[in-house]
Image (tube, rainbow, N blue to C red):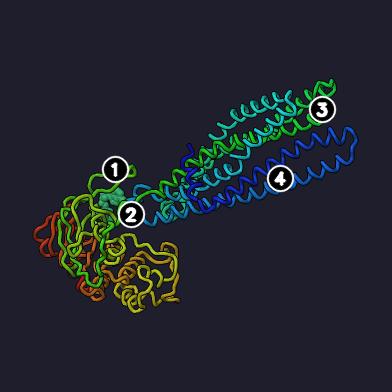
Amino acid sequence: MLKSLSRTFIVFKLYRGRLILSQVLLLISASSAIGVATLTQTLINEGIIPGNLDVIVDTGLWMAVLALVGGATMAATGALAVFFAQGVAFGLRKYAYDNIQRFSFANFDVLRTGNIMVRLSADVNYVMLAILFMVMLVLYAPFMIVVAFILTAVYAPSTIWILIVASVVVLGFMGLLLPPLVRAYDQRQKRLSDLNDTMQENLAGIRVVKAFVQEDREIEKFHQRAESMRHPSYRAAVRVALMDPILIMITQFFILLALWVGGRQVIEGAGMELGQVVMVVQFLSMVIMPLSTLAIAVPFILRGDTSAQRIFEIIDAEPFVKDKPDAQPLDPEKVKGRVVFENVTFAFRRPDGKLDPPALKNINLTIEPGERVGFLGATGAGKSALINLIPRFYDVTEGRITIDGVDVRDIPQENLRRIVGIALQEALLFRGPIYFNLKFGNPEVHDDVMIEAARAADAFEFIVRLPKQWEAPVARRGYNFSGGQRQRLAIARTLTAQPRVLILDDSTSALDVATEARVQDAIPQFTDNVTTIYVAQRISAVIDLDRIYLLQHGEIIAQGTHEELMKTSPLYQEIYESQLGAGLKPSSREVAS
Ligand SMILES: Nc1ncnc2c1ncn2[C@@H]1O[C@H](COP(=O)(O)OP(=O)(O)OP(=O)(O)O)[C@@H](O)[C@H]1O
Ligand SMILES: [Mg+2]
């Protein structure tokens, strides 16, 4: 029980000393409160009733000191508990984040990014809350209750039944009130997260919403979500509002009962004195308070455990792509760049961990050092899947891929990704100056390399026209640049890293044909003898290359130069015909260059 939550306590050995200190302080605080209650007995029986001023002053002073100690230790524990919860939250987030950086692409397929965000925010908060409750209550509440019972049994045994009945009534009341409250909270939480999703999606896609004039429908959707949250929120709030007054009522009732039962005994001289009666009254609230807080805490602690489990799933997840212990790095300077696929089959992984039907089947191909080849195919044909295998973003399901004869799985990933440079299909930039983005893969590289890379990617012109040039700020995800500019910056970033095998995944799709041609003519001049792999849907992007592989439904169905494919492949001819309308005749290349 509470396995994951207790693990947070074990993991954070660092704070163990403070955790123990907090519990010691809590016990001091509890003992002080009990001491004050016990001393009232002396104060009344030996001070007030006999009229002994010395006893009153003495006992009163002691009580004041105890109250002070109790308050101070409780405050210190509160501070420690918060510190501890924050420390655990920090540690959980850090460990999770560190491990996420080790994840391979397939881990994200299984764990979905949105889901990871929820785990790192909402779930961490639940764990924090649970830890606060545990630190403050797990030892304190039972201690307080047990001691109050023992002392009542010792000093006023005839009234102990009142404590028992009061405990049963409080627990019964909480048992009635809490489950629906927790249900309402859960429902509210779920609907809040629906509402957040709706809001996020709308704000991210606000341009699409406006373009399709769908504002009214979005407003209506938001209204419904917000409305559906109101009901459980209301139910939860009403119950919370009811809880305190009812608890106070119950406490008052039992205090009255104790006064009545005890008072009668005092008057009748049946064994109890006034001091004991007042003491029992104090013990009553010392039992009821922690008991009700404990009842509130239990569901939160259980929820915290589930949340901790979800976070540890991230912390414990093993990357699907791992380095072998005996993996040997290759010297990037000496890599020639011969890339071979041998009988490669590949399937994606579903969120449940099982494999999809293969996205690539039986791929066999050899790309010689320094060759420039292209992969052409319709959307969904498997082009990105294929090239993502080379830098091991995913591992092959069957077969193998070699670079200069070495299986990529025998090369450490870090080394492999310095050798294989890839401009991903989505040209994603980071917030920061342009030079930071361009030197992302290699911050130490000389400015000249960056500048030449920018020239090769046809980005030089627009960068130097910016007021701050290389220092010009890039907004989050690169939103302050056009799609084509982003793609060219992404190409320049990959070129700046000076890979031995260069892969451009549909990296010129947003460029006009003339710019695309300029980029393709400039790249080989920058990348001397670098094996270069282009991925494209448009023939214009691959027409000049040494060899074109035609991909369909995860299989290579034809290969050759443009001229060869025009003769041998009906599908290629068909694609060629269909793209002629876009002005993609070979002659257009000549016009452009
Ligand atoms: N992360 C993923 N998880 C599961 N299936 C995927 C994933 N990525 C791609 N697929 C599927 O694998 C197949 C090949 O996708 P891939 O991205 O390689 O296509 P593509 O040829 O690059 O297409 P495009 O030209 O649109 O980029 C598609 O059917 C796609 O739905
Ligand atoms: Mg793709």
Give the residue at mark 4: 70
Kind of residue at disc 3: Glu
Q: Is residue 459 left or right of residue 40?
A: left
Image quadrant holding the C terminus, namely: bottom left
First in sequence, mark 4 or 2: give its number: 4
Foreground residue among 165 and 57: 57
Give the residue at mark 1: 354
Determine the image quadrant of residue 256. Answer: top right
Query: What numbered label is drawn on residue 104?
Result: 2
First in sequence, mark 1 or 4: give its number: 4
Kind of residue at disc 1: Lys
Residue 521 x %, y %: 23, 73
Distance of label 4 from label 2 (alpha carbons): 53 Å
Say which element carries label 4: helix
Say which element carries label 2: loop
Q: Which residue is drawn at 83% across and 24% down?
A: 266
